[in-house]
Image: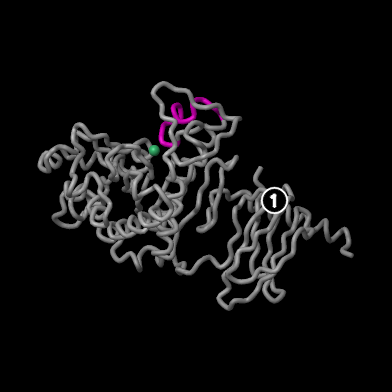
Amino acid sequence: MINKSFLTSAGFILLFILSVLRLPAQQYDAGQTYFGASQYIEYLAGELPIVITAPHGGYLEPTSIPDRDCSGCSYARDTYTQELARTLAEALEARTGCLPHLVINRLHRKKLDANREIVEAADGDPQAEIAWTEWHHFIESAQAQALQRFGKGFYIDLHGHGHDIQRLELGYLLTSSELRLSDSALMARQLLSESSIRTLAGNAPQGMTFPELLRGPSSFGGLLEARGYPSVPAPAMPFPTTAEPYFNGGYNTGRYCSRDGDAFDGLQIECNWVGVRDNAANRQRFADSLTSALMTFLEMYYFGDVSTSLCMQSGVNATPPEFHIYPNPRCDRFYAEQHDPTGATWQLVVYDFFGQILIQDELPANETLEIPLKYQRDCLVVLRRNGQVIRSQMLFYCR
Ligand SMILES: [Zn+2]
């Protein structure tokens, strides 16, 4: 039997660890998922200089947040854009070995529109306002981390439109009528400086003009078009006609891209339904194609050889994280996996707040262990291999 004084000192140690680990809340580890206060906003921390957001793909409709009710507001979900964003993150990881940053609004648009300024977004509800603040905190943290490491980055705000014309609508903050200007008029009016790819202006390869960056064969739309995804603007459809609906980029694109001088370029992608969002196989196919187009775009204009510059620059190799627990914070269960290259089985021990063992289990390599845990407080997960402690990590409770 373990004596009481040991438990007390272990408890103090754990309390100390807890208090220390709680402080650096801004520290986000790649591969880990973080949630806001009520799990309305989810952030999958990455290490690529790519930030993807899905503001309108949420399902949660908590009764504690009243439905938004504002004149002229939209409440419709962009169906399957949350799923598409996750698939895109997976495709990028499969391609590069590293994850992009991914921020998801899990609230239904009826409760929070995460692509509006706070008044219209939250309609005055305090909980929705907290979620709105968390949404922006996570995006800002992601961009800051990418800028610290790379000095630049690329942002994609992912949406779905319900327009009849089945094509991707790429929003660079230029209006439909501005896009209908001739190439020479676009240049003469210096509309690049009002666009979401303004930073490219100073860095574009010799001889590349703004219209070419916007709708030439080597534009984002051109690269998608070449992969079988009709897009506007792009060579085949350089602008929407006056009769055609078109989304040119919203609040997030304005806030997180380079128009106002930020180092991040980016755009809003409004996805059509057929062949892009309508089923899992098509979302997978599109995510792969979008990954391919994005990598080509980043290689041409930002990072050179992306196979060596994006993932390796961090000093982290391309293998999956050796140990992973998720979600964190967790509610009534969590999952654990480890990828020990030797294939060794590890021992997983979960300690409560006072240093007592809650769970002890074997964790084989490359398997996912589902672990129910009713304990309603933070705890500490310790991993051992052959009796030696090799990793430990706080596992927070979802309050
Ligand atoms: Zn949308």
Residue located 83% across and 58% down the image: 7
Q: Is residue 66 above or below residue 176?
A: above
- Report which residue position mark 1 lands on: 378
Residue located 64% across and 66% down the image: 391
Query: Image quarter for residue 130?
Result: top right
Residue at the bottom extreme, as displayed: 342
x%, y% of residue 168? 29, 45
Query: Image quarter for residue 311?
Result: bottom left
Q: Is mark 1 within 8 Å of ligand 1?
A: no
Display colour scheme? one colour
- The quadrant in which the C terminus is found is top right
- The quadrant in which the N terminus is found is bottom right
Q: Is residue 361 left or right of residue 194?
A: right
x%, y% of residue 329? 62, 50
Q: Is residue 136 above or below residue 343?
A: above
Q: Is residue 357 above or below residue 23?
A: below
Read off the magenta span. 114-126
x%, y% of residue 247? 30, 37
Is residue 358 located in the magenta-colored stretch of the structure? Answer: no
Q: Is residue 88 left or right of residue 346?
A: left
Front residue of 227/43: it is: 227
Q: Is residue 15 above or below residue 250?
A: below
Front residue of 255/75: it is: 75
x%, y% of residue 39? 58, 43
Is residue 121 located in the magenta-colored stretch of the structure? Answer: yes
Q: Residues within 10 Å of mark 1 (few under 14, many from 20)?
A: some
Q: Is disc 1 placed on a helix, strand or loop? A: loop
Residue at the top extreme, as displayed: 71
How many numbered markers are drawn?
Answer: 1
Q: Given the image, on which type of amino acid does mark 1 rest?
A: Asp
Front residue of 266/166: it is: 166
Q: Quadrant of ligand 1?
A: top left
